[in-house]
Structures are given as structure tokens and as C-alpha cells.
Amino acid sequence: MRVTSSFTSLFALTVTAAVVLFPTAAQAGLPRRAPSDVKPVRVVILVDESGSLSGQDVARERAAAQLIALSELSPQSQVSVVGFGSSNGPGQSAVDIVCPLTGVETAQDRESLSRCVERLHRRGTEEGNDTDHAAALEQALDIMNKPDDQQRAKIVFLLTDGVLDVGNSPQYGADAQARNRNAQAQIGSGLKDAERARVQIWPLGFGSADKTSLDAFATGGWRQPCGGQESATPRARVVANSADVERSLLEAFAYARCAGIEESVTDSLDAGATVDLHVNIPIIATDGSIVVVKRDRRIQVTYFDPAGAQVPKQGEQNDSTFQAAGESGPVESLRIRNPLPGKWRIQLKSPPGVQRQDVSATVVWQGALRASISLSNPRPRPGEQVAVRLRLQTRTGTITDPAALEGLRFTARMSGEGFQELPIDLSDTGDGADRGEGDGEFSGQVAIPASATGALSFLGRVTGPGVAGDERPYATRVAGPADRLRAQVQLDAATVEPGAEVSGAVRVTNDAGPAQLGLRLVDVPGTVSLSAQQLQAPAGASEHAFALRIGAGAPEGRIGGVVQVVDATGQVVAEEFVDVDVRPPTPLWQRLLQALLILLAIVAVALPFLLVRRRARRRAADPSELTLHLFDRPGEPYISRLQAPLGEGPEFTFEVSGGRLVRTYGTGYTVRRGAGQAVLVRDPSGQELDPLLPGRPIALPGGLYLGVDDGRARGAAAEQPAYGGREPYQSRTHRPMPGDDLL
């Protein structure tokens, strides 16, 4: 794969995006307007049709003209294509408007431009096949002077392979030398008109084109298209051959309309084969065109976003809008509003029988961005320090990626009554800024001059390559003696799913009487709302809770903007940036899996504890260390004894038969442990007998007595044995009797 150099270093495209604190709309109690779209342009492409062109030259010129027509980013732009040669005799015209001034709003508009460009051709002698630059410029200026309610930027592209040659055109004078001089004088006059009308001229020459004469076109028109930056002023280019026209013109187009351009990626496509080209769309881009030069109209193109999903050629997908044009021609483009940033895959498929072609893809993009600016104290007093904070937002959210902000410059200035304008140094002071992990916020401190008396304004600017900015006045006033209310907004950064709420609070210190304050959102998408619009601030200190409600349809990504607190006059008394990262809803299977993992974690923690408790309970209830004794009378040696069985449960049964304790199953006396050292006994009828304690026999029917010895109790008190250090019960013979039941 071959990658064409992008001349990135040449394209220091700079547009100023300015924001002034407290705009006129805010003074009226209205939120600031939505971010601007990319600015529209009016483009005229002048294409040389002189006889010195080869057939390949004409094909390259057509493709170059189609590139411009199909690459334009703003739906409100207009494009016209004019072929030119010369007028050497009756019935000939030096210019031929092959594409009248046409909008590019719809796919049909752009297809129409792509088709009419096909009318460009190499002129024959009978058509006037010399080179009349003067007539071409005159025609371009005539088109530019048509009424324009959009105040579009005016750009002329001049494609030519030769020098001015009107020696055979009688309208310029009596002889060849006079004719060329007169035409050159007409060009000089036309260039002055172009400068007055703020028309840029971008010449592109190839073949035998003379760069000196082309330089005159570039320097003669308007030369401040992108904020007056020297690197962004029109200049002439001369390429070695027509094969370089496409890329050079596309670069000039991006340069002229203050857009960014990525590297062109080129590869060869064989008949019946498929090839993938990968191009990048930066995160800062809000509008872009992927321009594909396929040469043969039969080649099919498919587009895949950075997530791997195939995108439609017309319509919407997620938050992006797509519009393809030129599918039936040699040049095709996909215009995208709100493109997903990252690496896109362009798949080109050639049908069998198509000649091997070099194909290429290029991204032209622009960032319709707005700067969001905030003060730590919107009503400062003279002498106070104020923090000025600036962020950059696209249509869909705040930009925090340091790599995306690289190359942009954040500046601010303060002006007002009673002092001269002051610059404010801004830097990325967010968390991790020293590690290259800034949060997208640039801030700086400034002291309000002691001489400040009234109106106060702060102007924030963001400049950088490919940035189309937004300028909005936003003014406030220094606080006076009557300003006795101060407020602070507490709103932490949060990560939520659609439909959630983010809690915030307004802390108010009011040294005057009760006051009504308003809450409003500025530069925040319509999918976000406030739980309250007003709050009542009593005298003294108070705190008021509110919530940001993230709509169920909120798209994924970072939400920026500002929450403002305003007084009854609409003046801002406190504000804070919104910093909410909206994540897609967690799928049901994932929520169930999370619940299962939490349950397993709880079980893993609780199970050992439960097992210990269970073992403790079983241990406490285990009767195996109990020994029952049968007596004729208390205090006498036992006549029979019975050892509790092992491992048969918390209770066991026995009966008294023939003066002996006999183990039974199911019927008889039931024995189990009770609280402490007590042993509980039920008779065969289920009646509870008195608790049985070691050393304290209880009476049984028939004049016998039942006692118990607890080995567990003896073990626990081994140092001090019960019953004065002797066995609690002794047999009459001090040895087991034949009638004992030992289990």
C-alpha cells in the first residue's frame, strides 16, 4: 500500500472561535444558541480546455472538479464549474458554464454537479482552443457578484496547463502582442475587483503553466481567508503532471475553506478483486467528507465506521447523518455530519473485466466547535481574583482528549469600563495535566483592576487547524455596594446511563432580604433538563438541591455546557461546568451477570461464617457427651447408665425397662440439650419434665430417679472438677454392671 504525504505541516489552518462571557441572549434570560455549522462557501472552478491538453489531462481535470463539487462540507454552499479556452472567431465563446451555480444540499444536487462536470472537454480549433485567463476570471467574478443572503466565503480555483494566450482573439486588439498586453491589463483590473469583493484565487498549474503568472492570481485576490494567518493565504501551485492535480487541488480546497485534510491512502485494485483503504477522522471533526477516487464508475464502495459497522449511504445511524454522491461516476464521496471519530474502513470492489486501477481515499473535515467559558465569580468586585475557565465543545459533547486538543490554542482577554484590555494566560491545569492527561479545561487567574467601574467582559478564543469557530459576546458588570448576594454551584463530574439524574446543589449567602433566583442550562443538549427552574433564597445562608435529568434518549458521550444561577434581572451570580459522561444502558444479560457475581461474592463472604455458625449450633446441640444415670434414690450409686449415641442428631430416645436404661427408636423418653447445662427431657406422652442438670436428678414414675453427667462441662472445668473432685455418680460396685447400656 502506498500512502501519499499529507503536507500536514503546510496546513496550519486557523480560524478564530471567540466567546465572550454573558452574551446578549443571556442578558435577556435566554440560553446561548446551539453550535454553528461549518460556514458555507461559494466556489467557482475554472478549468482549462485549451488544445494543448491531452485526453488524460482532461480526465484528470474532470476528476479534480468533481472532487471539489463532491467534497464540500456545508449543505448551504454553492459550486459552479466553468470551462475556458478562447474566442477566436464568430460563434465562439472563451468561457463555457458547464455547471451553473448549484447548491450542494441534497444528494441529487451533488449528483447533478458530478454529471455536468463530464461536459468538460478538450477544445478543437473551431471552438477556440487557446488560453484566455482574462475571460475566465471575468466570468468567475460575475458569478461571485450574484446576490448572496448567506454571506458565503468566495473561492476561485484556476486549473490550467498553459500561460495566457489570446493572440488569435480579435476582441483584445489589432495584433497578437497588443492582445496579450490588453488581456493582462484586464486581468490586473479583475484582480483588484476580486480583492475588493474578498474573493480568494487558488491557481493550480501543470504541464507548461508559468508559476510567475499564476502567483499574480494568488496574490492579487483576497488573502485573509482564515483569520489572516500567513500559512493559510492563497498561493499558486504547479505540479509535474496532471496525475498530481487531484491531490493538489483537494489540498488547496481544504486550505481555502479553512478545513483539515488527512493523508490520502492509495492502492491498486485488480479486476474482480477487493481492497480496503483505511482513513482517519479526528475527534475534533464535526463534519467530514470521505472522498474516493475510483476512476471506473463500475467499482463499488462500502463504508465502515471505527466500530466496524457498515454505515448507510443515505440517512442516519446513531447520531450521524450520511449523504453519498457520485456513485455512478469516477469520484464518489460520503459526507458525514457528526462522524464517529477514529479509523474508517473503505472497501472497494471491482467487478470482473475492469482494468486494474489505482484507487485512493482522502478525508476532508472541519470542526464546527464552540468554546464554553465560565467565571469562578460572575459578579466580581474591583481588586478580586477571578478564575477564567475555557472548554471546547462539539455538537455532541465536551472534548477532553489531550491528543484531540493538541495544536489548538486557548486564549482570553478581559476588558471593561475604567481600564485597558488585559490578556489572560490560560493553561491546562486539570487533573493529570502534568502527565498529558488533561481534562480539556484551560483556566487562568486575573485580578479585576481596582479602577473597574461598570461593564466587564471576558473574551475567550480557540484557534487551530480545521476549526470553524463561534464568536458570541457575553458581558457582565463588577459588583457594587448593593450586591449583597453570593452563590456557588456544586455539581460534580458523573458517569451515568440515559434516564439517570445527577445531583447538584446551590449554596447561597444572602445578606439582604429574601430573593428569587433562577436556574438555567447553557450550551447543554436538549436531552438534558433541570429538576427546578427557580429557587427562593431566604436571608442568611441556605442550600438548595437540584438535579440534572439525563433524558432516556441521550446519546453516548460526554455532555458539556454550564449550569447558571441568575438573579431577577437576569445577571449571572454563579455558574459551573457540566461534566457528565453518558454510557449506553447496561444490557439485561450483563445486569443479570453482575447481579449473579454480586450474589456469588456475598455467598463467598457469608458461607464460611454460616458454616461456622452451623457447626457451632450443631456442636451446641450435640448430645453425644451426655451420660444418663438411673437411681433408686438421690445420693445413692446409680443402678444403670446410658451413653448418648454418636452422630444421630440433636436428640435421642430411651425407656426404663426392668430397672435399666434402654436405648429405643421412635418412642419413649426424648432427651436433647437446652440452654446452658440444662438437659431437656420429654416423657413418652410428650410432657416436658423438669430441666435435668448435672448433679441434680429428677423423679421418674415408679419411684426411680434420672440424673445426667455432661462430659463437655467437665472438660471445660477440668481444673476445677464438679462435685468436689469426685465422679458425680458412682455405681454400687464402682464398675460397670451387666445391666448398663453402653452405646
Image (cartoon, rainbow, N blue to C red):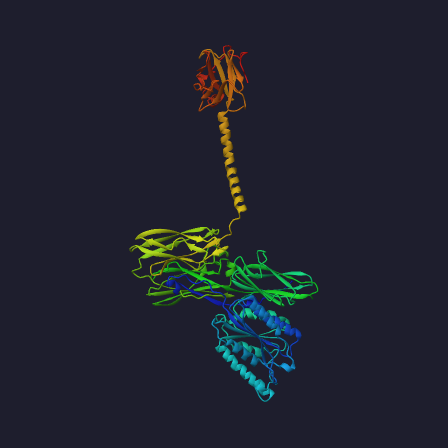
Q: Is 377 positioned to the left or the right of 686 in the image?
A: left
Q: Is 503 positioned to the left or the right of 89 in the image?
A: left
Q: Is 203 positioned to the left or the right of 450 in the image?
A: right
Quadrant including the N terminus: bottom right
Above or below, 400 relative to 641:
below
Please tell me which residue is depicted at 49% across the width and 31% down the height of the picture. 613
Above or below, 606 relative to 666:
below
Query: x, y percentage for residue 395?
Result: 48, 61
Quadrant including the C terminus: top right
Query: x, y percentage for residue 162?
Result: 61, 79
Please tell me which residue is depicted at 53% across the width and 44% down the height of the picture. 592
- Indicate the quadrant where residue 246 lies: bottom right
- Residue 388 appears in view: no
The outermost residue toward the bottom is 174
Query: x, y percentage for residue 401?
Result: 51, 58
The outermost residue toward the front is 108
Query: x, y percentage for residue 154?
Result: 51, 73
- Indicate the quadrant where residue 134 lies: bottom right
- Residue 30 appears in view: yes
The outermost residue toward the right is 353
Front in this rendered view, residue 657 or 474: 657
